[in-house]
Image (cartoon, grey):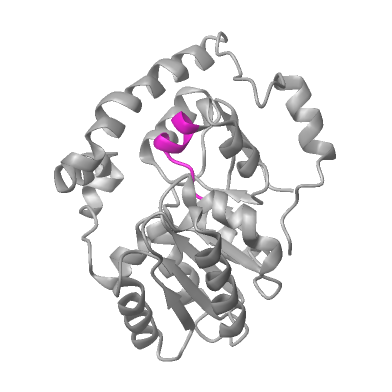
Amino acid sequence: MTEEVKILNLSISNLSRQELLNQLKLGIVFTPNVDHLIKLQNDPEFLKVYAVAHYKICDSTILLLASKFLGCPIKEKISGSDFFPAFYEYHKKNRDVKIFLLGASAGVASKAQSNINQRIGRQIVVGSYSPSFGFERNEVECQEIVDIINRSGATVLAVGVGAPKQEKWICKYKDQLPNIKIFLAIGATIDFEAGHKRRAPKWMSEVGFEWLYRLISEPRRLWKRYLVDDIYFFWLILQQRFNFYKFPTVLGLEKDQYKSSKQTSNISAKV
């Protein structure tokens, strides 16, 4: 059983990247960061969806530092944009691993597919699809996506449409994708793989300033997330450190009731 570290109302898998690569044969992988933790305080559906994931890996230097401050250090930051290329490199010669990319704007996912396959030297990415804006509310398009994925022969689905949309989509449609063994929620990674967006310099990521690079790159879209919403995270961590953090209600259930319902729930990942 994977060791977990509790940060606010989420248990994060305490694994190194290599341990995760070695373990991951089946299951759902989410990549929580500060923005996710804030959303999880107020979005009960998102919290229920998170309960389905087998692996919840630390995608933030800030979370890594918070775990140390709380006295339960996480082994390693494993961002989705680092883990995904490590995953397909790890399975370079594994013919059973066939990846489908879902996300990014028109043409970007197909460019990422081409780049990855060229890098690996085989067709490890067997399909891609860039959905329309608001696709998650269009059941006709969602069913078309399910059909395309099923026809592709993919065994791994990497979804990069942003949180909480990507996690909720995986949870809703996973049972309609019988050939998919591994589900990865990877945020902006498809854009990075396509060369459509640039990642922060490595040193900025290592010292916890990747958020600043992203804010400067996309100020209109991200200013509220980083300068308003996420500031609240530090106050919540102080509450947890000094034992007065209050677990939010989940669909009317208090903390102990939620734990009990999670243990007995029939909401489980299809593997």
Question: Which residue is pictured at 29% across the width and 39% down the height?
Answer: 208
Q: Is residue 43 magenta?
A: no
**Towards the viewer: 17 or 191:** 191
Q: Nearer the viewer, residue 270 or 67?
A: 270
Is 255 placed above or below 156 here?
Answer: above
Viewer-closest of 158 and 129:
129
Q: Is residue 38 magenta?
A: yes
Q: Residue at x 53, y 71 (%)?
A: 145
In the rendered image, the vertical position of residue 126 relative to residue 90, given as above or below: below
Question: Residue at point 60% right, 31% down?
Answer: 44
Viewer-proximal residue, 71 or 24?
24
- Residue 118 horizontal/vertical position (percent): 34, 87
Left or right relative to 116: residue 217: left
Give the answer, above or below, for where 116 lies relative to 76: below
255 sits to left or right of 144? right
Image quarter of residue 50: top right
Q: Tell me residue 78's x, y (percent).
A: 45, 52
Position in image of residue 220 (x %, y %)? 18, 40
Range of residues picked out in magenta:
30-39
Count up the numbered dots: 0
Residue at the right extreme? 264
Image quarter (top left, top right, bottom left or bottom right) of the C terminus: bottom right
Q: Main secondary structure of the magenta part?
A: helix
At horizontal 49% and vertical 30% (from top left) the residue drawn is: 67
Residue 146 drawn above or below residue 63: below
